[in-house]
């Protein structure tokens, strides 16, 4: 089947190959883009540097690759590796938000000049750390995505043995055995709030959660929601609602034999152990693995899962997605186990949405 | 030479080719192990050394030779795979990713230069489709 390519905005089509690949390298996973390149039968290359070389080639493959990278970058602004919280929204509120979204004026900010590209790393340190509205995007179904940029950082740690230190450092810090340095590495986050109009659902989607510590990840969704409420007044006070509780889906999705492919599972048994299992072969489903299967038979299928990872390969359009529901072991002891977010990894917006749609069918209401 | 149709014939081919060498005993022990583990999805290289040692065959070179032979075109009982292991997490990678790591120090997960990447790439084996057919057949 011929896949209809998504629109590429004119601002992206004017970006040079060098800038485009550098921007992708800064914010997307090599594993995801490699998979997408293979799917499109485009030259994969052995790494980012090689990819840049292929994309700069002055031939038909180079031209096709450049269009692919532009589309990939456009999609990556709202997809990639994300932490997502879901809210169901009443129909009247959906209509009201859509009406307001159509009147939003885009503010000028430190990010505006280079958007959709990220700011240079040396400028990012002084860029706003609060989510700042940079674009509002509407897809073919009428779903609206509010895109917020912010400067974030993660700690890059290095350790040096005593012998590696300069004489000056040895003298300054006399008596030390090892020096551990922490350098702040800055990056531009593209956080998103998407309103699924037909599904009456709102998604708060935190970009690159792996770069945030657990404390920052906990507060980030509310920061994004508050930033959105500055432009969409209907969302003022919306944060008082709890996000959808996803905990029950962990067990239900694992138990649904045909629901994607389980790649990892953490669970408690009634025989006095806690187990973590992960497949290392990409083509197999943990549910069918011989060791796991025998264990399940031995305990009469009675386990209490608290973490699960599932992968899907989708068709129409072709794509793939990974979903991780990471509950806490302690929640199994709770009268009402709770999980207020999930991790989604997908390079296409269609696959990203499909993974969430599959999850929603398992939420207890 | 006629392709072996069952385990006995596979052993015979190996014994004839490596006659008088320690590879025969090691090879036969590995074929025996494969016959009992045809649904294995991951056999680390170390398993073959263990099999040899269990039979008091302390023949490191012979193990390397025979594993190489069993992975080759003539018998092709072993299929090879690669994985990237870091922080207790193993990820399956393809041969192009393994080659990029060995030749150019490219990390298969980040696509970036990583001068320590070679220490994180490991080879493993699984019984090939030929092994499932040949070793699964009655003599």
Image (tube, helix red, strand yellow):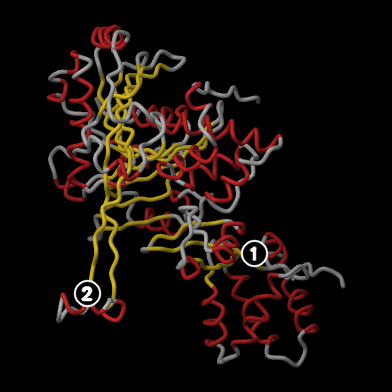
Labelled disc at residue A172: none
Extreme residue toward the front, this view: A168
Q: Where residue B92 sits in the image (x, y, percent)?
A: 51, 57
Front of the two marks 2 and 1: 2
Circle 2/circle 1 CB separation < 8 Å: no
Nearer the observer, A318 or A132: A132
Q: Chain of mark 2?
A: A
Marks 2/1: CA distance? 52 Å
Q: Quadrant of the N terminus of chain B?
A: bottom right
Labelled disc at residue A169: 2
Nearer the observer, A350 or A287: A350
Residue B124 figure quarter: bottom right
Q: Where residue B139 sits in the image (x, y, percent)?
A: 75, 71
Q: Where residue A112 sits in the image (x, y, percent)?
A: 34, 26
| Crowd around label 2: few <14 · some 14–19 · many ≥20 (10 Å) | few
Q: Residue at 57%, 66% (x, y): give it.
A: B102
Labelled disc at residue B79: 1
Residue A218 figure quarter: top left
Name the side, left or right, on which A276 lies relative to A224: right
Q: Secondary structure at mark 2?
A: helix
Taking A280 as reference, is A354 above or below it?
above
Q: Residue at 41%, 42% (x, y): give it.
A: A310
Number of numbered callouts drawn: 2
Taking A60 as reference, is A89 above or below it?
above
Q: Residue at 38%, 40% (x, y): give it.
A: A81
| Crowd around label 1: few <14 · some 14–19 · many ≥20 (10 Å) | some
Q: Where residue A129 sits in the image (x, y, percent)?
A: 22, 37
Q: Residue at 38%, 36% (x, y): give it.
A: A118
Q: Chain of mark 1?
A: B
Taking A178 as reference, is A205 above or below it?
above
């Amino acid at each position: 089947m011929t896949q209809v390519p998504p629109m590429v905005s004119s601002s992206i089509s004017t970006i040079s190959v060098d800038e485009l690949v550098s921007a992708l390298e800064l914010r997307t996973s090599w594993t995801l883009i490699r998979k997408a390149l293979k799917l499109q039968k485009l030259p994969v290359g052995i790494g980012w540097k090689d990819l840049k070389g292929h994309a700069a080639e002055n031939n038909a493959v180079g031209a096709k690759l450049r269009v692919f990278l532009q589309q990939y970058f456009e999609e990556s602004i709202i997809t990639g590796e994300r932490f997502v919280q879901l809210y169901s929204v009443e129909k009247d509120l959906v209509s009201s938000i859509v009406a307001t979204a159509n009147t939003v004026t885009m503010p000028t900010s430190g990010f505006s000049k280079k958007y959709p590209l990220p700011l240079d790393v040396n400028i990012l340190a002084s860029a706003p750390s609060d989510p700042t509205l940079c674009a509002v995007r509407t897809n073919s179904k009428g779903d609206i995505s509010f895109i917020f940029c912010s400067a974030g950082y993660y700690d890059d740690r290095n350790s040096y043995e005593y012998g590696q230190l300069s004489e000056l450092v040895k003298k300054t810090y006399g008596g030390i055995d090892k020096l551990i340095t922490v350098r702040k590495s800055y990056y531009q986050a593209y956080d998103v709030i998407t309103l699924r109009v037909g599904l009456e659902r709102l998604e708060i989607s935190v970009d690159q959660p792996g770069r945030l510590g657990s404390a920052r990840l906990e507060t980030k969704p509310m920061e994004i929601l508050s930033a959105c409420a500055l432009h969409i007044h209907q969302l003022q006070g919306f944060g008082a609602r709890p996000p959808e509780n996803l905990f029950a889906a962990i067990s239900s999705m694992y138990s649904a034999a045909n629901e994607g492919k389980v790649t990892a599972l953490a669970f408690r048994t009634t025989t006095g152990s806690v187990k973590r299992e992960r497949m290392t072969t990409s083509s197999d489903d943990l549910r069918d693995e011989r060791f796991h299967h025998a264990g399940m038979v031995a305990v009469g299928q009675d386990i209490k899962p608290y973490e699960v990872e599932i992968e899907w390969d989708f068709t129409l359009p072709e794509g793939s997605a990974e979903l991780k529901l990471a509950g806490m072991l302690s929640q199994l002891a709770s009268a009402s186990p709770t999980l207020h977010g999930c991790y989604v990894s997908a390079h296409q917006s269609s696959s990203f949405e499909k993974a969430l749609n599959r999850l929603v069918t398992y939420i207890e209401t | 030479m006629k392709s072996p149709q069952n385990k006995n014939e596979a052993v015979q081919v190996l014994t004839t080719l490596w006659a008088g060498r320690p590879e025969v005993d090691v090879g036969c022990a590995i074929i025996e192990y494969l016959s009992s583990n045809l649904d294995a999805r991951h056999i680390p290289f170390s398993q073959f050394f263990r099999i040899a040692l269990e039979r008091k065959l302390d023949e490191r070179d012979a193990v390397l030779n025979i594993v190489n032979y069993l992975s080759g075109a003539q018998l092709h009982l072993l299929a090879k795979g690669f994985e990237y292991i870091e922080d207790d997490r193993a990820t399956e990678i393809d041969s192009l990713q393994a080659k990029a790591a060995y030749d150019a120090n490219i990390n298969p997960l980040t696509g970036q230069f990583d001068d320590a990447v070679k220490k994180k790439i490991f080879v493993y084996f699984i019984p090939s489709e030929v092994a499932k057919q040949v070793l699964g057949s009655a003599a």
